[in-house]
Amino acid sequence: MAKKPADPKGGSLTTRIKERDARTRNRIVDLADAVAEKALAMREPKIEIPIRAKSNTIWNKKQRVLQMGQATSERELFNLNQAKQFMQTCLHASSIKDLIGAEKTLSLRGMFYKGLHTVAGTKEKTFTDQDESDGILEDLEVSLGALREELHIFAKKKGTMIGNITIIDSGDEIDCRRMGSGGYAIPSIVEPDVIQFKKCDAKFVLHVEKDTVWGRFNEDKFWQKHNCILTEGGGQPSRGVRRLLQRLNTELNLPIYCLLDCDPWGHYIFSVIKQGSISLAFESNRLAIPEAKFIGVRSKDYKECGLTDDVQIALNDNDTKRAKEIAAYPWFAEHKGWQKEIDLMLKNGFKMEVESLITKDISYVTEEYVPQRLKAKDWLE
Amino acid sequence: MAKKPADPKGGSLTTRIKERDARTRNRIVDLADAVAEKALAMREPKIEIPIRAKSNTIWNKKQRVLQMGQATSERELFNLNQAKQFMQTCLHASSIKDLIGAEKTLSLRGMFYKGLHTVAGTKEKTFTDQDESDGILEDLEVSLGALREELHIFAKKKGTMIGNITIIDSGDEIDCRRMGSGGYAIPSIVEPDVIQFKKCDAKFVLHVEKDTVWGRFNEDKFWQKHNCILTEGGGQPSRGVRRLLQRLNTELNLPIYCLLDCDPWGHYIFSVIKQGSISLAFESNRLAIPEAKFIGVRSKDYKECGLTDDVQIALNDNDTKRAKEIAAYPWFAEHKGWQKEIDLMLKNGFKMEVESLITKDISYVTEEYVPQRLKAKDWLE
């Protein structure tokens, strides 16, 4: 299960990092000890791995997040189908111990290379490709109850932030009010030991899907006029972006408003931000934001905003199928507003992008659309 | 042809922007006047567009950059095959005039939507898709002799920067020495009216292909230890990243060292950074960096660094084909070092990624590989 990050205010930063690393290392040692003990007792070495699949994903209605269930599978050394994975798991666990010892982090690609070699006495490689390596790392996250960040592993960077907040990143004070047209690039690891919130005047966060839309909002000084923070995730936001949004929501009590496309992909992005995803259900407590709000674009906007048929992008078969699947997600199924929203999109027969609001006026989205919706509290939860 | 940007030191910023915008607007008006004049004289309205294709690309051996030739094609109103493009060109030219008047910028996607409508009296749309719109905008760049940025149009943001430099972005002072683990996100428009260099202590720029490699260098404080600037372009660098590198090279006299994969894609990225590309040959004077240096990864590194066969990724037929094409580029063809480099890669039969150096040690690339190559001046030009 996802472990609660250390309270950013308790103890010195270095002490907390050391404690966290010691904790992770101990868990790796425990895992290794359990394997060794069994082997020495002439019993079969095996590792228990929680199952990351839809079948083991639970919708926690009270907390309004997806969670991982209790089912586990065993990974045995003396099982022809599992021996390789067993070896890979031990190999990566050992690499992580090295990383913690060296006080360094490594990318997912780097981990693949670090673990890659020819198995002694054979012509077989330890890993076929990076996908295999990535999967083992997710297994280790859940087995060790430690997050990827705690395992000293980072992913591709994605997304940017600007607005009324000053943060500390790795000891550097960064004033997000003075980040020009480029903005602050959100790193992959945004845990409290890396990033601390120093001074926040903002009253809410506006999260947009694409950086080009973000550019429009930044150029129109939306975050100054409306006293907020502006983030973008470059499509489906990375774990780093989701975690940062969740920290802004839970630690600073900032509402998170999402401006996404009116299409199944936009709805899915919202679903992941709000409730978490199946593959990362074990991380939901750290990533999901049950209070996130979907401010648009809405199916009703076509009529309500007086858009022309230029903005219509016809739904294809796959869109329709995805829309129905998403409508059946428990958290959408029980929500009348979302049922109406998806129904109307299907009835319309078309999707719409945020950029399509430009057909009204270049700054319609920043000067009229979002301000009106915020004022009228017109959003989907 | 690419116009030289205004001297960042001459005149006030606002004055220079106004002058630049006035210049661009005048060119649009001239274009429109020429069309109107012909129409009023009962002659066929047409626009002359320089040809952006390999056939009209010249390798300027003296300047060591790709340039656009003199060939043009005509776009006529009364030509069934050209009438639509003629209309699209006028439509976008008019939108750009609006943008300049409103002092706003718009994304490529936004331009598509801005120009999109149903042609009066028909069921036909002005644009079929964004590709069509993007192409017309490139045509306008070359016809008007004004860069995309001068047309107030921006693209997706890509790439990050950190290091011993302080810049001003849209009036905000940004100290790239204090940008934490995330870094400064390089915007799409980095012209002198948006970004000015305030204080630079760095002695060179290390440009890496991927942000995960950039993360390794940043974590190891490479830019502090070696007094440099560290940039990444997320694969093939955007125009914004290339332009920023070129400005760092020409205005601050910083050498640009590139650390890219040892594969045809890495070689192509280098070629584009150094000499420009065919599709943007009209921009080479503003984007190409003939002095850029390729510091690695090199084919010889397999033996020289004592790597194991784990790092080998077999070349496929397409790789081999691309490698031979690149070897035949005039600027590679006349360069013995590059011929040897590509020959050895083909002889090796495999490519190697920068990340593969991790098989030696996590920080081998930052602590040994790059410092040694810099010291020995061991690179390809």
Image (tube, coloured by chain):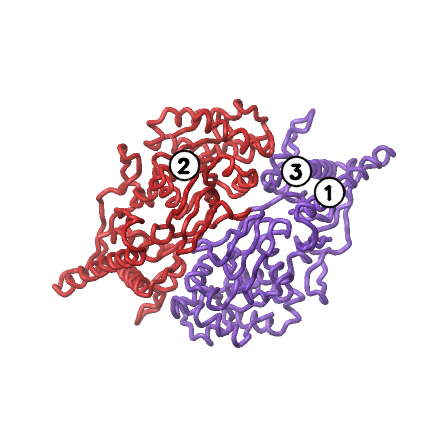
Chain colours: A purple, B red
Q: In which chain is the residue bearing label 2? A: B
User: Crowding near pointer 3: few (<14 within 10 Å), some, many (20+)?
Assistant: some
Q: Quadrant of residue B109?
A: bottom left
Towards the viewer: A311 or B200: B200
Please give the residue where the numbered disc 1 appears in the rendered image.
A22
Residue A82 in the image: x percent, y percent? Answer: 74, 39
Marker disc for residue A99: 3
Amino acid type shown at disc 2: Ile
- Using residue A56 as the reference point, say whether residue B217 is left or right of it: left
> Do the residues indicated by labels 3 and 1 lie within the same chain of the protein?
yes
**Quarter containing the C terminus of chain A:** bottom right
User: Crowding near pointer 2: few (<14 within 10 Å), some, many (20+)?
Assistant: many
Query: What is the distance, in whole Å, between disc 3 and disc 1 at their CAs?
Result: 12 Å
Amino acid type shown at disc 1: Ala
Residue A244 in the image: x percent, y percent? Answer: 59, 56
Kind of element beneath mark 2: strand
Kind of element beneath mark 3: helix
Please give the residue where the numbered disc 2 appears in the rendered image.
B256
Towards the viewer: A84 or B359: B359
Whichever of labels 3 and 1 marks the residue nearer the N terminus, that label is 1
For the residues bearing labels 1 and 2, Cβ distance under 8 angstroms: no
Query: What is the distance, in whole Å, between disc 2 and disc 3 at their CAs?
Result: 31 Å
Residue at 43 percent across and 38 percent down: it is B202
Amino acid type shown at disc 3: Leu
- Using residue B220 as the reference point, say whether residue B379 is left or right of it: left
